[in-house]
Image: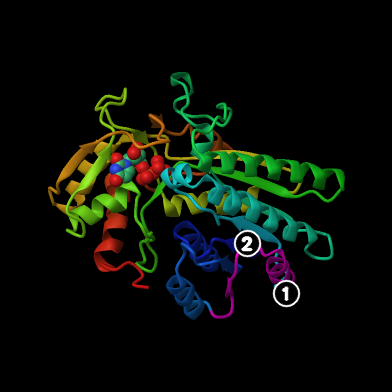
Amino acid sequence: MRILVTGGAGYIGSHACLRLLQDGHFVVAIDNLDRGHQTPMDMLGSVYPDSFRFVHSDLGNTKIVLDTINIHSLDTVLHFGALAYVGESVEQPLMYYKNNIASGIGLLDACDQAHNGAGISRFIFSSSCATFGDPSDDMIPVPEHCPQTPTSPYGSTKLQMEQILIDYAKKRELDNNPIALTILRYFNVAGADTSGLLGEDHSPETHLIPVAINAALGRRTSMTIFGTDYPTPDGTNIRDYVHVDDLIDAHVLAMNTISVGQCEAFNIGIGKGYSVREVLEAVRRVSGVDFPIQDAPRRAGDAVALFCDSHKVRTVLGWEPRYTDIDAIVSTAYSWMLSHPDGYAE
Ligand code: UDP
């Protein structure tokens, strides 16, 4: 296939590019580099000079996106490009709506006009478990039909993009020009590619596992647990951590399984929840370092417990995660961070 990867210079997008290139696809990554990195784009370009291109642009620039799709005869879009911090979205909601919705519509406009109006034929959207908000106890583990009531602007942007895409897919059906649409709702993505080429490098870093690894490696003096009074066995939040390579597997399976005219949503997580304290214990075990941990109040927008009912993705796509143990996931992140003390050093 000939694939446009939006947000291709980001953590998950770059892992997707690598996997698609390994599988023999032609890949164009597009990224405004606000949060993504040039270095992995240069690395992929040097390893795959014939099948990889990088375009430095905002997704909202419909003309550049349209030209990119047309020039390279792209047929598939994997749409990762988005701002993705729950806490930041509470503080700067307009930035999130502008980036995740307005730019998303710009991208969709380009997809619609591509190939003289024939359009892109396959679209996979990175949605989030944040679209579910704080599910009631009878909805844990969280199935696809769980009511979607986001508790943060980030979650709202993802839900609204889902709805926009579903409406767009219906329009394509009416035009007798159907599209294959897959919505993947990620739970907490973690870990790094095991070849050592790619990893997770956010600035600032706020995600639990890399923050804890930084504490273990002495790159920060301590770390903080946001909330120890939740109604969970140890008082801390519960999340479902899925390895980035397993997550990308789900995209590859969706690309090959969901056919034009189909519109399917899947929850992607291993189906097992770990509390914040359990994750921190895993980081202590993997690193062998008993780093300091401080208790702090709850963080705005955080749900109590979110872990996935992964039945649908397993049965319909045949997805089977390779990493089902938190120590194994943490180990891959730890290895990359240990060997990259300054991340991508940009
Ligand atoms: N968390 C924490 N301390 C940190 C970062 C995160 O206690 O320094 C908690 C956070 O409150 C949440 C879980 O770890 O319950 C996962 O947070 P993360 O930011 O990694 O992902 P999110 O669930 O927000 O997508």
First of labels 2, 1 by sequence position: 2
Residue 321, position as x, y percentages in the image:
43, 45
Cβ of mark 1 under 8 A from ligand 1:
no
Residue for point 65% across, 60% down: 60
The image quadrant of residue 333 is bottom left
Range of residues picked out in magenta: 49-70
The image quadrant of residue 240 is top left
Label 2 Cα crowd, 10 Å radius (few <14 / some 14-19 / many 20+): many
- Tell me if residue 318 is in the magenta stretch: no
Residue 280, position as x, y percentages in the image:
23, 43
> Quarter holding the N terminus?
bottom right
CB of mark 2 within 8 Å of CB of mark 1?
Answer: no
Label 1 Cα crowd, 10 Å radius (few <14 / some 14-19 / many 20+): few
User: Closer to the camera, 224 or 188?
Assistant: 224
Per the image, the residue denoted by label 1 is: 71
Per the image, the residue denoted by label 2 is: 59
The answer, for residue 236, to whether it is visible in the render is yes
Residue type indicated by callout 1: Ile
Task: Select label 2 or label 1 by which is in front.
Answer: 2
Q: Secondary structure at mark 2?
A: loop
